[in-house]
Amino acid sequence: MTETATVRRSRITPEREAELYTAVLDLLREVGYDALTMDAVAARTRSSKATLYRQWGGKAELVAKAMRFSKPGGFADVDTGSLRGDLHALVGRADDCVIEQNSALMRGLFMVVHTNPELLQAFREFLIDPEMAEFRRMVQRAVDRGEVPADSPAIEYVVHMMLGAFVTRTLLDELPPTQEFALSYIDAVILPALGVRTH
Amino acid sequence: MTETATVRRSRITPEREAELYTAVLDLLREVGYDALTMDAVAARTRSSKATLYRQWGGKAELVAKAMRFSKPGGFADVDTGSLRGDLHALVGRADDCVIEQNSALMRGLFMVVHTNPELLQAFREFLIDPEMAEFRRMVQRAVDRGEVPADSPAIEYVVHMMLGAFVTRTLLDELPPTQEFALSYIDAVILPALGVRTH
């Protein structure tokens, strides 16, 4: 993280940040990305647009960070002692209603990303890259524990597998990506691909 | 297949069908799904609209079948004697240029599918379901040969894995889903998940 980013971040409390992200997510659900304006975010959260721009640079960064915030929990304190435990704990944090809501929002944004390089860039920088790094740390702990062979070729595809499962579930099965599905996919595909023995 | 479908199909030669699908794919690349009209297809292929509607019912079915046609080869005569050989043969039929073209087209159509239930229905019926059935037959042969344990829980996720790899490759890595990537993903993820020993 650059010094500038640290300084920017220090100007706002975590509670206020959460409040702003929640407002952004509400607006995204109400009007979609294209119609969402910084004016509307400022009005809804009673902030000045200057503050929003100082803190987030622009709409793409604000939306990418709000999406990252929308994922319940995050990885920070997940460390159960086994890779299966860690992955199940990640999934277990979100109830199905939240998963379905976020997944609908994400599908909508994927369409925008496709034609909006600025949003794609923000998604990569503030959502995809940090999440891939978290997965890499989680898998590295499993390698260090001897659960996953260090040379397992599936290691570089963990995020492809996770994200691919969510994306294709809706299309192939016309079903929402529920907890039950995610847990089943982890046990059926991800752990065996990595070479983890589960029974 | 219903009797009606058989009758409809018999009215046109395979060469003529290929010509029509090629024209539809060209038009899709030129103007996109929403702007593509049956009039334009009729003009481009020197057919009557009545013939097009009799043969394909409508735009959604015509586009779904053209997309299925666009996949080089298909499964029909792939049977190498091993699952790895079969999957590699499927991938090996398309050169990277064709893969990239089809993948760009498919990404565009995924966006439309998201908001167009008629196209989603046609995709399911004429593209996804037939392809899932082909994969199931291919995997069943591997089960029958004793390559894949009959109770491998990854069997029901083969298409999720394949499709998920293609979809996420572009987003996560900003790279086209090349042959090399597909072959690597098959060996790193799909075969180990299914329990196939590859070395």
Image: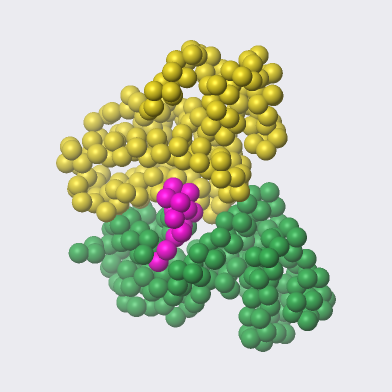
Chain colours: A green, B yellow
Looking at the image, how many numbered discs can be counted on the residues? 0
Is the residue A7 above or below the residue B126 in the image? below
Image x and y of residue B130, in percent: 39, 35
Q: Which of the image's four quarters has the C terminus of chain A?
A: bottom left
Is the residue A11 above or below the residue B47 in the image? below
On the rendered structure, is A37 left or right of B190? Answer: right
Would you identify the image quadrant in which residue A45 lies? Answer: bottom right
Name the residue at 78% across, 80% down: A47
Image x and y of residue A24, in percent: 68, 71
Name the residue at 23% across, 36% down: B141
On the question of residue B117 being in view, the answer is yes
Name the residue at 41% across, 21% down: B6
Magenta-drawn segment? A166-179
Q: Nearer the viewer, residue A157 or A65?
A: A65
Q: Which of the image's four quarters has the N terminus of chain A?
A: bottom right
Image x and y of residue B47, in percent: 63, 15
